[in-house]
Amino acid sequence: MSRHPNYVGEFMLWTGVAIVSLPALYGWQHLTLISPIFVYVLLTRISGIPILERRADQRWGDDPDYQTYKEATPIFLPF
């Protein structure tokens, strides 16, 4: 369903925390809702997935089964 389900779980965790905390926030505290966006950008653009994808491509990049897996499986969000 996803090549990086642990990162999807991390993103869902922080999204859930933001949603649950929403009723308790007021004023400038609403800035904390940036957290899920920050986690998403961090995992998909900066530190998480790009590093793992590069390493996987170096290790299994020539393997036809790996190429099929990459084409058939979404990188982050399922479906």
Image: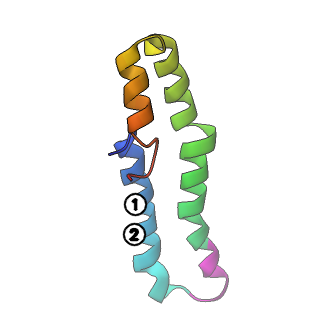
Q: Is residue 48 visible?
A: no
The image position of residue 26, as x and y in percent, is 58, 89
Which is nearer the eye, 55 or 68? 68
Which is nearer the eye, 55 or 70? 70
Residue 42, magenta (yes or no): no
In the rendered view, tell whether residue 39 sits above or below residue 69. Answer: below
What is the number of the mark on residue 12?
Answer: 1
Going by the numbered disc 1, the residue's amino acid type is: Met
Magenta segment = 26-31
* Disc 2: which residue: 16
Which is nearer the eye, 44 or 14? 44
In the rendered view, tell whether residue 5 sits above or below residue 53. Answer: below
The CA span between labels 1 and 2 is: 6 Å
Mark 1, other Cα within 10 Å: few <14 / some 14–19 / many ≥20: some
Numbered disc 1: secondary structure: helix
Q: Residue at x 51, y 28 (%)?
A: 53
Residue 28, magenta (yes or no): yes
Left or right: 28 with respect to 23?
right
In the rendered view, tell whether residue 60 sits above or below residue 67. Answer: above
Numbered disc 2: secondary structure: helix
In the rendered view, tell whether residue 59 sits above or below residue 48. Answer: above
Q: Residue furthest right?
A: 28
Report which quarter residue 60 is drawn in: top left
Q: Residue at x 45, y 46 (%)?
A: 76
Mark 2, other Cα within 10 Å: few <14 / some 14–19 / many ≥20: few
C-beta proximity under 8 Å, tags 1 and 2: yes
Going by the numbered disc 2, the residue's amino acid type is: Gly
